[in-house]
Amino acid sequence: MKAQTLLAATLFSVAISSPAWAAGDAAAGKEKSAACAACHGPDGNSVAPDFPKLAGQNADYLSYTLKGYKTKARTNAIMNGQAATLTDADIANLAAYFASQKGLTIKR
């Protein structure tokens, strides 16, 4: 019985920490992305070399990065200010939107 309880608790912990639970809404992210478009382009494909392309990036990476700017674990005067007011839902939605966009492709 004790082993079953431990197994159930472990599986529950893994399930609730899964990235699928944190998946955002790309449509809501698109609505929130207007401020991002000035530097990163409307679909995340920046034409300016100083601003990274967000389109097609991994959603987990984008979320991690935005959370880093929000907490100031990553420092950038512009991005710290932009991320300061984002909620966790905003971050998940923006990450989902930019991850769903067509990014760079490799020609073979």
Image (cartoon, rainbow, N blue to C red):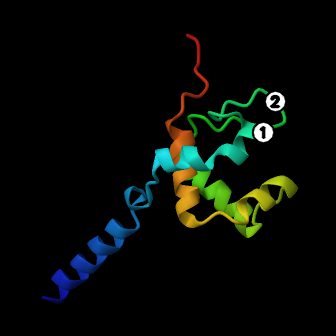
Q: Secondary structure at mark 1?
A: helix
- Rendered view: 20 above or below 7: above
Which residue is tagged 1?
Answer: 39
Picture coordinates of residue 41, whole percent (x, y):
71, 33
For the residues carrying marks 1 and 2, which lies nearer the camera in this image? 1
The amino acid marked with disc number 2 is: Ala
Q: Counting other residues with Cα less than 10 Å from the Cα at mark 2, is it few (<14), some (14-19), or many (20 or more)?
A: few
Contact, CB < 8 Å: mark 1 with mark 2?
A: yes
Q: Residue at x 60, y 35 (%)?
A: 55
Residue 79 appears left or right of 63 = right
Quadrant location, the N terminus: bottom left
Foreground residue among 50 and 39: 39
Mark identifier at residue 91: none
- Rendered view: 80 above or below 100: below
Q: Residue at x 59, y 18 (%)?
A: 106
Which residue is tagged 2?
Answer: 48
Can residue 108 be seen in this snapshot?
yes
Residue 15 appears left or right of 108 = left
Picture coordinates of residue 77, whole percent (x, y):
87, 57
Q: Earlier in the sequence, mark 1 or mark 2?
A: 1
